[in-house]
Image (cartoon, grey):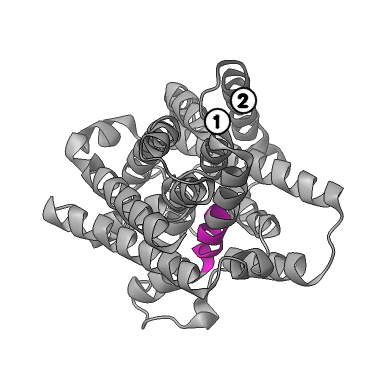
């Protein structure tokens, strides 16, 4: 039987709210109901994405929100919490098998430096925009980092470091919705803009890889332009993904846990270390192609389950209270990301 401890008013995605009991443990069977509804909702999202061409993560989030009423049943909480936290972190670890240090080095030091600078500037622009509208630097860092690195995956990872007290689940869900929608618009619009600007294949690939939020959509936009643009977009986008680990380190240093001094590398979350280890393994050793394909599919599945569970657990009343102004940091960061990526493509490629 599931423990009857008090459930917090706001779904506790990362288990760090004061109202929760940190040492609660559940029997294995307690996880099944929440995991079952998460899997069913995720399968529905995958079906809609495959048959109608909609962004997979956005579909998972929207269907999760449609099932939000189920969050009132406390029997679902253990499974939903496991999906939105543990499965998320393992998905982040597996992202490390999608890139190698050699792919990053092939860009050259100037282009690599430009990408690093863009990630930093876009993240800071989100924080600045959030402070302007009175939302706080932590929320802005969440929004800006999601745009700067890899969309929903980065938002979930950054929120995991920030914790619920700094970035509530309602704010996380809002960022997930906004960044998924912005990425979908960018995927549709940027190839046409690249054609109208008469960009070369490499320039177009750099633009889309450096500015579109979601990995799949960045690659899809690149390959819709040309095969060469798609290859360039892949390397540039995965370079941004590789910056997730150092970005999380900076976030951990900038937003130390309450009651602690600022953390060094020893406080780096385990899933970030796992990400770096798998990236190093892929760089130094030959990983069988079936293993890489399987890891990519597993990453997509784990992140989809995490996003869907996040939608189910989101407190809709608090989400609606955020208002449209809360999307401003994502919009500002998206526009700055496009401008910087276009400038770098024209000057460096």
Span of residues in magenta: 237-245
Left or right: 130 in relation to 168: left
Q: CA distance from mark 2 to mark 1?
A: 6 Å
Left or right: 181 in relation to 131: right
Which residue bears the numbered disc 1? 56
Which residue bears the numbered disc 2? 46
Earlier along the polypeptide chain: callout 2 or callout 1?
2
User: Is residue 9 among what the camera can see?
Assistant: no
Pick whichever, 123 or 255, lies toward us: 123
Does residue 348 lie above or below 38 as drawn? Answer: below
Left or right: 196 in relation to 239: left
**Could you say where residue 327 lies in the image, as x and y percent from the top left?**
25, 40
Residue 298 image-quadrant placement: top right
**Could you say where residue 345 lies in the image, as x and y percent from the top left?**
41, 55
Q: Residue at x 43, y 53 (%)?
A: 20
Total marks in image: 2
Q: Badge 2, how many Cα within 10 Å: few under 14, some, many 20+? A: many
Q: Badge 1, how many Cα within 10 Å: few under 14, some, many 20+? A: many
Pick whichever, 177 or 201, lies toward us: 201
Q: Do the residues bearing badges 2 and 1 touch, measured as CB atoms within 8 Å? A: yes
The answer to whether residue 242 is magenta is yes
């Amino acid at each position: 039987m599931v423990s009857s401890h008090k459930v917090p008013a706001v779904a506790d995605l990362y288990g760090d709210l004061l109202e929760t009991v940190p040492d609660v443990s559940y029997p294995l069977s307690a996880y099944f109901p929440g995991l079952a509804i998460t899997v069913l909702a995720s399968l529905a999202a995958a079906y809609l994405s495959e048959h109608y061409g909609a962004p997979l993560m956005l579909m998972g989030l929207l269907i999760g929100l449609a099932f939000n009423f189920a969050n009132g049943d406390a029997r679902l909480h253990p499974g939903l919490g496991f999906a939105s936290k543990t499965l998320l972190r393992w998905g982040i670890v597996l992202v490390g098998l999608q890139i190698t240090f050699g792919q990053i080095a092939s860009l050259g030091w100037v282009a690599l430096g430009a990408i690093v600078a863009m990630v930093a500037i876009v993240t800071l622009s989100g924080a600045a925009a959030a402070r302007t509208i009175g939302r706080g630097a932590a929320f802005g860092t969440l929004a800006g980092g999601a745009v700067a690195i890899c969309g929903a995956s980065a938002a979930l990872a950054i929120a995991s470091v920030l914790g619920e007290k700094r970035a509530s689940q309602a704010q996380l869900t809002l960022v997930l919705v906004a960044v998924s929608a912005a990425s979908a618009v960018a995927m549709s619009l940027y190839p046409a803009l690249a054609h109208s600007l008469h960009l070369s294949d490499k320039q177009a690939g750099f633009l889309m890889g450096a500015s579109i939020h979601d990995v799949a959509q960045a690659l899809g936009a690149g390959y819709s332009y040309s095969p060469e643009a798609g290859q360039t977009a892949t390397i540039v986008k995965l370079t941004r993904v590789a910056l997730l680990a150092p970005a999380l380190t900076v976030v951990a240093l900038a937003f130390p846990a309450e009651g602690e001094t600022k953390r060094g590398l020893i406080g780096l979350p385990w899933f970030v270390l796992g990400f770096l280890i798998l990236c190093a393994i892929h760089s130094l050793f030959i990983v069988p192609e079936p293993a890489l394909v399987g890891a990519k599919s597993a990453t997509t599945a784990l992140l989809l389950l995490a996003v869907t569970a996040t939608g189910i657990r989101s407190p809709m009343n608090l989400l609606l209270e955020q208002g449209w102004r809360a999307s401003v940091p994502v919009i500002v960061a998206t526009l700055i990301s496009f401008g910087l990526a276009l400038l770098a493509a024209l000057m460096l490629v």
